[in-house]
Image (cartoon, grey):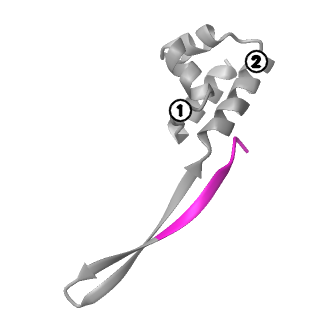
Amino acid sequence: MLGKMKIKNLYQSHASGNGKMLIYKTVLVIDHFRTGQKMKLLRMSKKLSLRKLAKKMKISAPYLSDLERGKRNWNKDRIKKYQNNLNK
């Protein structure tokens, strides 16, 4: 597992014409700092520099650095893109 990921169930009341309706949705909560730390360790274990990986991912090196340090938020697509480019 990459970092601490939790599934949270959120309930929200919604007023409708006949009273209240309960809205249920599931949200994935990612610990961005821990995810970034693990991603950095993966990158370093592949002996890949930050700049080379950023170039493969088509993002700037400072942006990738911010992701790895937890300054920016990871999402499912970024994680997938990161892992795909580590394996190329």
The numbered dot on residue 78 is 1
- Which quadrant of the view contains residue 23? bottom left
Sequence order check, earlier mark of 1 and 2: 2
Say which amino acid is labelled 2. Met
Residue at position x 53%, y 32% from top? 78
Whether residues under marks 1 and 2 lie with C-beta atoms below 8 angstroms apart, the answer is: no
Q: Does the stretch in magenta take in 13?
A: no
Q: Is residue 22 above or below residue 69?
A: below
The numbered dot on residue 65 is none
SS under mark 2: helix
Q: Position of residue 22 (x, y in %)?
A: 39, 80
Q: Position of residue 76 (x, y in %)?
A: 54, 41
Q: Residue furthest bottom?
A: 18
User: The magenta stretch spans which residues?
Assistant: 1-10
At label 1, counting other C-alpha atoms closer than 10 Å, the crowd grade (few under 14, some 14-19, many 20 or more) is: few
- Which quadrant of the view contains residue 12? bottom left
Give the number of callouts. 2
Q: Does the stretch in magenta take in 7?
A: yes
Q: Is residue 21 above or below residue 64?
A: below
Residue at position x 56%, y 63% from top? 8
Residue at position x 63%, y 36% from top? 33
Picture quarter with the N terminus? top right
Q: Which residue is mark 2?
A: 44
- Which quadrant of the view contains residue 85? top right
Say which amino acid is labelled 1. Arg
